[in-house]
Amino acid sequence: MRGALIGCGFFAQNHLNAWRDLRVEGVDLVAVCDSDEGKARMAAAEFGIPRVYADARAMLQAEVLDFVDIATRMQSHRELVELASERGVNVIVQKPLAPDWSEAVAIVEAVRSNGVRLAVHENFRFQAPMTKVKASLAAGAIGRPTWARIAFRTGFDVYANQPYFRQEKRLAILDVGVHVLDLARFFLGDVERISCEAQRRNPKNLGEDTATMLLRHLSGAVSVVECTYEARIDPDPFPETLLALEGDRGSISLGPCLTARFTHDGVARTEHLGSPLLSWTSQPFHTVQESVLNTQRSIIDAWRAGREADTNGHDNLKTFALVEAAYEAARTARSVVPQAGGA
């Protein structure tokens, strides 16, 4: 499969490393593109990519591609997805899918009307501990899941590498809340209603930097979903997501350092849910970095098998609907029903 990457910034380095690892599985990144051509040239030189572009339209006209991986900021996603899909090229796009609901729906409709596939790079569910917890739930480790707390809470200086965060009118829920809301769906299924309390704890931020959400799932389960970039906790678990799940037969708790405790019918055990370092990953970021590889492999494997990726556009709209409902719930101080079916 022949692919190209659009966007060679901060997080795209993980995409580049992951695509290099996937070469042995028959995936060839043949071009990179960035509006800052210097960044694209540096990426091409480091990762052995033959061609460099500063304009996505020019690249899509010149290259024969099976897919394009869009790792740019969300404001550019719609234009780039439409450019690629109009040329019959499958698309992977970084999360969040779009700045708002109407743009997200337009992106999904564009790929549908052009007959190509879309996958969202929603990588939290592909972190090793999350896939292991999901497998345990599927195997009945705690019986029927009934309650969960999913928390991404940190005071790590995320603004150093992404200073534009300070000016985002919609920050914590849209940037990291979308991840933890997706995990809530991943573990407990789709959502009937959501309430939310949003806070701006740091006056330097334009948008909310903290959100506490309560979800009622269609299954009857309830989850508490938390996200903040302004935690004051020690030790800071960044960049880990902490979990507590309970069912009618037991529980799973995932604490700092990827240590999980399982109980089933009163019998407890402890297990480390991490995985070995890759050649290009490092602590404490390894789990997040590895999830990029896992996400990209999952998407490619699905497409090769002739099916949609797990994080396809229609599935991601269900998560994006929760983001929009959370903002509406915070604004109105009431519980909100998300868009039915994510559409």
Image (cartoon, rainbow, N blue to C red):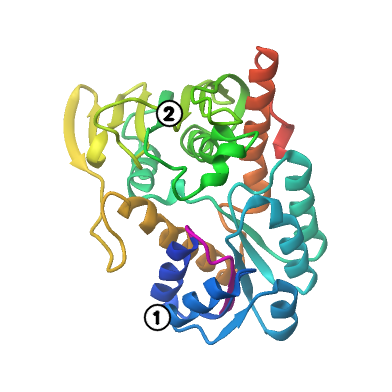
**Quadrant location, the N terminus:** bottom right
Q: Is residue 224 left or right of residue 92?
A: left
Q: Can you identify the residue that label 2 sits on?
A: 230
Amino acid type at circle 2 is Glu
For image coordinates 52% across by 62% down, the residue present is 9
Q: Position of residue 235 (x, y in %)?
A: 24, 31
Q: Residue furthest top?
A: 333
Q: Is residue 125 left or right of residue 264?
A: right
Find residue 341 and report its image quarter. Answer: top right
Reply yes or no: does residue 9 show up in magenta.
Answer: yes
What are the residue bounds of the magenta stretch? 1-11
Look at discs 1 and 2 and give the one toward the viewer: 2
Q: Residues within 10 Å of mark 2 (few under 14, many from 20)?
A: some
Element type where label 1 sits in the image: helix
Query: Where is 187 relative to 234, above or below?
Result: below
The answer to whether residue 343 is visible is: no
Q: Residue furthest front?
A: 204
For image coordinates 61% across by 46% down, the residue present is 96
Q: Position of residue 16 (x, y in %)?
A: 46, 70
**Between 25 and 34, the one nearer to me in the picture:** 34
Q: Position of residue 18 (x, y in %)?
A: 42, 68
The answer to whether residue 95 is visible is: yes
Element type where label 2 sits in the image: loop
Q: Is residue 249 left or right of residue 40?
A: left
Find residue 338 and report its image quarter. Answer: top right
Reply yes or no: does residue 297 show up in magenta.
Answer: no
Query: Where is 50 relative to 224, above or below?
Result: below
Amino acid type at circle 1 is Val
Q: Can you identify the residue that label 1 sits on?
A: 24
**Quadrant location, the C terminus:** top right
